[in-house]
Amino acid sequence: MILSIGEILADLIGEEAQIVRMYCGGAPFNVAVNAKQAGAQVCFVGKAGRDVVGDFLENACGKFGLDECRILRDPVRNTTLAFVTLDRGERKFSFFRRDTADFHLNRKELRGVWERADLVHIGSLMLSERSGQVFAKSLVRRAKREGKTVSFDMNLREDLFADADAARRAYRYFVEEADILKLSEDEVCFYTQTKDVQTGIAALGDREGVLFVTLGASGSYFRCGKLEGTVPSEPLVPVDTTGAGDAFFGEILARMDGQHWRSWDRARFTEALAAANARGGAVTQFRGAVRAVSDPT
């Protein structure tokens, strides 16, 4: 079973006629939904405020069919908001987040789901706060002790940090310790301070686990031990790219959970990346990061 831990928030996406519409969002929540829709057993744990946005998220969560969706409610702090602007389908984020609920999690709140998890996926938004870093590191150490697989997606939000170096320091432990690591091509270059993705991938060095890199319209890349390869994606005109990387990773994790993926051959990785590219592409064809199966097309 996959346990995804971290932020759930509202994406406020500007639409026509100056209308702003609210959607469920937050990278680890999006990953959880996509992994479930790809056939995995999935639980999600996150925190929202006791406000109307938190009510919206809690009510909407039931539509996605997760095996458990534990949205905790903070009586003091508000729910995190992400304002999203679109330019020909490409999105930019601006966060409303000052001591909001998403990173105020503790290990006691994981009781009953942690024990059942084989794969633990950790959201990155909490890493912009010291308390979130401490909590997330404790989860990685515990997961390693207990033989669980650790998954991490950088999901870079540089504006939440004091500067670029602070962001790199916050991400470093998780980049180094994750068994399954996913980065975008921009994140590879940002983290390694290189100018092109090939140089950046080389700068990351050899890994104990597996590295996935999304390459936008060019597809995706994997490296696991001596194996590596790139899988192209089908060309699409995006409506909204919000959540495309999360959809890609949800498909990947669903295929890897409970599997001996360290011994996969090239064909198995290629098959997984092709399916993940397709899932990521499908998400770009509607507004918002996730859609319930029952939602209208």
Image: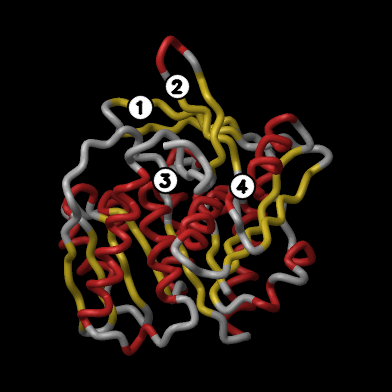
Which residue is drawn at the image coordinates 63% and 70% (left, top)?
139
| Label 3, label 1: how far apart the Cα atoms are | 13 Å
- Mark 1 touching mark 2, by CB under 8 A? yes
Looking at the picture, how far across and down is residue 76, in whole percent? 82, 38
User: What's the residue type where badge 2 is placed?
Assistant: Gly
Q: Earlier in the sequence, mark 3 or mark 1?
A: 1
Q: Earlier in the sequence, mark 4 or mark 3?
A: 4
User: Quadrant location of the C terminus?
Assistant: top left
Q: Earlier in the sequence, mark 2 or mark 4?
A: 2
- Mark 4 touching mark 3, by CB under 8 A? no
* Residue labelled with disc 1: 86
Dot 1 lies on which element? Answer: strand
* Residue labelled with disc 2: 14
Q: Is residue 207 left or right of residue 39?
A: left
121 up-or-down from 166: above or below: below
194 up-or-down from 141: above or below: above
- Residue 221, quarter of the rendered image: bottom left
- Mark 4 touching mark 1, by CB under 8 A? no
User: Quadrant location of the N terminus?
Assistant: bottom right
Q: Which mark is residue 243?
A: 3
Dot 2 lies on which element? Answer: strand
Q: Earlier in the sequence, mark 1 or mark 2?
A: 2
Residue most extreme to the top:
17
| Label 1, label 2: how far apart the Cα atoms are | 7 Å
